Amino acid sequence: MSTLHVENLKGLSSGGNANKIIVPSGQTLHATGHVIQTVSTNLGADHSYSSSSTAETNILTLNITPKFNTSKVLVLCNLGLYLNSSAAVSRGDLGIRRDSTLVRGRDDAGGEGFFRDSSGHFKSYMTVFNFLDSPATTSAITYKAFHKGNDYNAGGHFSQHYTSMSLMEIAQ
């Protein structure tokens, strides 16, 4: 293997690709800290729930296949929640899973992720999960934002206007 040492790379100043440095098809440029790929999704319609079940319900799911096993994945997730229950207390947990592994939030249905107190007022919440994950794989992975209720949870919904998830693979 040979090594080329240079201080600067500069594209040609004229022609159809003026001032560009082109990496040929089938080749990759690996620069630490650069975004390699981005995927994103939004909630297509309001996601409502009305059960007191402690079962986990996915709100959003998004897949990414990292190109390098050393890459990190920047997870940006916004969850717009409106509790519209008539219960005196409404509780639940929110979290993010990478495949089956909990990477952020809670999943014990203890009810501390969000709540509606006994004042009788409805509550709106914007929950944000932004973090840098280290999946250490080049296999396809799925990130899932989820909700888990508890016995007090009577109802609410996640708003399509405020609920989204983006994943960015960052070279290391």
Image (spheres, grey):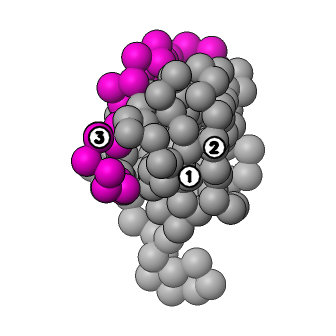
Circle 3 residues within 10 Å: few <14, some 14–19, many ≥20: some
Judge by depth and name the residue closer to the eye, 24 or 34. 34
Residue bearing mark 2:
49
Q: Earlier in the sequence, mark 2 or mark 1?
A: 2
Rounded to the nearest whole Å, what is the CA distance between mark 3 and mark 1?
17 Å
Rounded to the nearest whole Å, what is the CA distance between mark 2 and mark 3?
18 Å
Mark 2 belongs to which amino acid? Tyr
What residue is shown at x 51% (from left), y 80% (from top)? 18
Instruction: Determine whether 13 is above or below 66 in the image.
Output: below
Q: Earlier in the sequence, mark 2 or mark 3?
A: 2
Q: Is residue 121 magenta?
A: yes
What residue is shown at x 63% (from left), y 41% (from top)? 50
Circle 1 residues within 10 Å: few <14, some 14–19, many ≥20: some
Instruction: Determine whether 113 is above or below 27 in the image.
Output: above
Circle 2 residues within 10 Å: few <14, some 14–19, many ≥20: some
What residue is shown at x 47% (from left), y 18% (from top)? 109
Magenta stretch in the rendered image: 98-124
Residue bearing mark 3:
117
Judge by depth and name the residue closer to the eye, 92 or 147. 92
Q: Position of residue 52 (x, y in %)?
A: 59, 28
Q: Position of residue 123 (x, y in %)?
A: 35, 54
Mark 3 belongs to which amino acid? Asp
Q: Which mark is residue 1?
A: none
Left or right of 131? Residue 27 is: right
Q: Position of residue 152 (x, y in %)?
A: 47, 28
The quarter of the image holding the N terminus is top right
Q: Which mark is residue 157?
A: 1
Label 2 SS: strand
